[in-house]
Every structure is written in structure tokens, then in C-alpha cells.
Amino acid sequence: MDMRPDPLIMMTTQTAQATVAAKPKIVARNVNVFYGEKHALKDVSVDIPERSVTSFIGPSGCGKSTFLRCINRMNDTVPSCRVEGTILIDGKDIYDPALDPVQLRARVGMVFQKPNPFPKSIYDNVAYGPRIHGLSRSKGELDQIVEASLRKASLWEEVKDRLTDSGTGLSGGQQQRLCIARTIAINPEIILMDEPCSALDPIATARIEELMEELRHNFTIVIVTHSMQQAARVSQQTAFFHLGHVVEVGETPQIFTNPTDKRTQDYITGRFG
Amino acid sequence: MSEHIVKSYEQELAILDSKISQMGGLAEQLVGEAFDALASHNPARARATVASDATIDLIHRELEEQVILMIARRQPLANDLRQVISVLKVAGELERVGDLAKNVAKRAQTVSGETHPKGLLTGLQHMTDLASRQLKDVLDAYAARDAERAIAVWHQDEKLDAVYNSVFRELLTYMMEDPRNIGLCTHLLFVAKNLERIGDHTTNIAETVNYMTRGALPEGERPKGDITSTTLVSGPMR
């Protein structure tokens, strides 16, 4: 076998390194989360690079969703919840008391496991955010935002003739793409996705994954998923959570072919931990 | 190593390893038998050796089918992924070793009526011993997931190359001495080349064992000692 480095492999390795070397959009340091007495997240420190997809994997109850919800301060709405440590977005502390969580959530959008469109028309679902944030000055401008968002979410062609129909009348996969359109309508910088495909069939899942591939050029995406194959397919970085700790963070190809920590290996290969 | 939650997955991976060990054992046996048939001028033995290569091919096909099914069914990851891919590669190498040994046996049939000059087979015997030893060592390294041992085989192949170089020169000399030797010596030259190639396949397996256990290719240039491609022995001028 020729032992000279394959130029193609070298190229991909360099690209992968470039991804990791990219400026971190989100920097978390020693984040601890408590729900009452329960210590849910323990000393989590992670860098999340911008304009790429980072996936969080790990068994149920490992803290991955808890951490995701820290990034847009969704945990603020849980009364017993206490968050310690630092989370910076673009170098600014998002837990700064002077910061308005509503403004933060406009920059950090979220898509949930179960598609949850408002019981309103398809148009109004997407127009809702831009309206309350005052992002458009005229009906024409709002129409443009709605169309552009639906296009970016790969839904426009399927719904352009029935924008006044109820959003809840769409199929599950279409509803999820509507929720993504609603999220990107207010032009966020970060999109958090909490198991966005677990209620969808494989075709709808493939559409969402294709969409993530498109969106990552403009947005920083963080996805929580129980599907190892999905994490391997869509993300450039993967973080493995276990019992409230981040066990291992790395480039996705490395995590799935040659993880360093035995716990990561046991989890992704389906062995007893 | 902790066990898979899905027991049938664990069993499937174990079957892969046992089939590799079965295939490897057969390949080792074939290399030895092919040379014995040659050395003992025994065409019947040579024919039996040729026939038993079919078993290696059969196991190879079974392994390929099982690996394809496992990729479809289990989507193996991490060390499992590396094992499944390595099995596919190692099985391919062993299948080639079987073919090369079979070719030695075929030539043993062809030259069984010829009288060998004394001492002509010593070099080939040495090559057979080295190739068989490398094969055995690398299969043990596979079974034990021992990358160090695999790398040792990787380095060992230089010895086999060195003996091949001298056998090559020796056979050319015999041919120059007496043109009647050319038929026999040409066959023996191919036997030597086959044994040298078997050594190369063992180093490929060694690289795969290293990848399987460490997730990386061996570092540095692969040791190469075969210089016959650039060797020319000139005859006496008439």
C-alpha cells in the first residue's frame, strides 16, 4: 500500500480543522444547573463554532437538553431552576441581569421535538415574530419576509397557494419546516433544535437534514438528537453528554470512528456503560 | 470490553472473528502444503492443495455477505465500525494469499517430473517458512487486537524481501549455466514471487490490524526490501 498521504484525505482533514478553528459563537465555562436539589449539569465547558452544526448526544437524562435550554435562557421559566457559570455569545454574557431574555431569544431561535405551529394561518405563523419585533414597515415587506423564510425552510413551493390555511392542517414534516420558517423569520444567529426529527418519518427527516445543511452556511446550529446516524450525518462537531458531564467533544468523524473516551465508545456502539 | 445490549450483534461480531481465524488457518496450511507438494514432487498432493483453496473462497464470500448485512442492519460505529471494515479487508487479503498458494501448488504439479538441482529449494523453503511465520503472527495479532505485534510483522517483511532477492539471483544464475534449466527455474521464480507477494499481503493485514485497534494507519514509510525490479544479471559474452 502506498503510504503517501492521500491529497483528498489531507484536504478534508484541513477543512475539518478549519471548521474547528473557526471563531466560537458560543462559549460555555463551568456551567452548573440545579433543579431544586438535583444537580443536572456539572461543570460543562464547551465552545460552539459559528456557522456549523454541533450535535449533542447522550442517554436520556444526561443533561443535553438542559444545556441546550441554557443557551436561550429557557430554563428561566422553570421556577426551581438555578444556573451557575458563564455562557457567552459573541463574547457577551447572556446571563447578565441587564440583558433582556426576550431580545436574547430573538437572536437564539428554538425548534422543538413536536412541531408546534400556532393555531393560525401558515402566513401568520411566519409573520408573527417579525410583527412583534417590528421587523417590517409595510405589508409588502412582511410578505417578502414570509416568502423568504418559507423558501429558506424549503416549504414555499408546497404552501404558496394556501397561505391562509391553518398551519395545524399541514403534515408533521411540513409543520416542522413551518416552525423552522417561523424561527428564521426573525433572522436569528443561532438555531437550537431539540430532537427536531424524532416525530417525523424518514422522508420528512431527510428534508429537515437537507435544510440544516443549507442553513448552516448562515446560522450556528445546535441539535440534540438521539439518532447517532443523524448526528454523524448532519453535524461537524459532536459533544457526548453523560450523567450531567460533557465527556468528549470533537470533530464528528473522529467521535464516530475513533472516540477517545471509553464511555463515548460504549454509548455509540450500544454497549453497557 | 463491555458487551452489546443487543446480544445478536455481539454474536455476529464474534462470528466475523472466528471466520477470519478459520480462513487464516486454512491459508497458512495451504502455503505450507503447496511447498511440500513442490519439494516432494507429489502431484496428487499438489492437486489436493489446489482444490482446498475453494474453501477459502467460500468463507470469503460468506464474510462479505455478512459484513454487508451488518452495515445495513446495525450501522456499526467506532471500534465496531473499524472491526467490520477490517474484516472485509483482511478477508480480501487472505483470499489473495489462498490464490497465490494455489498457484504455487499448480506449478508444483507442472514441474513434478523435473529433477531439481541440489540446494535449489533451500531458498524457497526459507521463504515459505518466513511467509508462514508472518501470516501466523499477523493472525495472532488480529485475534489478540495487538497493534505492537502487527507492526512487528510489518517490519519483518524486509527479511522475506531479502531472501527473495537472493533466490532471484540464484535462479538467474542456474538459467545462465544451462538453458535446460530455464523451464524449471522460471516456474520456481514465480513460486518465489508468489511467496514474496504473500509477505506483502501479511503487511497489508498488519496495517489493518493497527487501524482496527488504534484507529490510525502506521506511521512512516513502509519498509521495502524487494529490489528485483531493478536487478539485471548479465550473462557471459559469447
Image (tube, coloured by chain):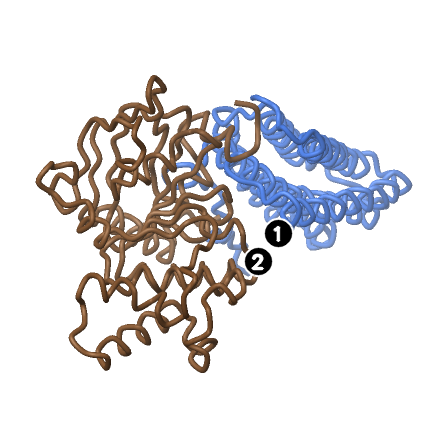
Q: Determine the residue positioned at 21% across, 78% down.
A: A141
Which residue, as the protein is rendered here, is positioned at the far left?
A: A98
The circle on residue B176 is 1
Label 2 sits on a secondary structure element that is helix
Which residue, as the protein is rendered here, is positioned at the far top?
A: A37
Q: Quadrant of the C terminus of chain B?
A: bottom right
Which residue bears the numbered disc 2? A202
Label 1 marks a residue whose chain is B
* Quarter of the image where one finds residue A8: bottom left
Which residue, as the protein is rendered here, is positioned at the far front?
A: A119
The reply to the same-chain question for discs 2 and 1 is no
Chain B's colour is blue
Question: Does B88 appear above or below B118?
Answer: below
* Quarter of the image where one finds residue A214: bottom left
Label 1 crowd bin: few (<14), some (14–19), many (20+), radius 10 Å: some
Label 1 sits on a secondary structure element that is helix
- Position of residue A120 in the picture relative to residue B30 (left or right): left
Question: Does B231 appear above or below B143?
Answer: below
Counting from the top left corner in percent of width and height, residue A75 is at 29, 36
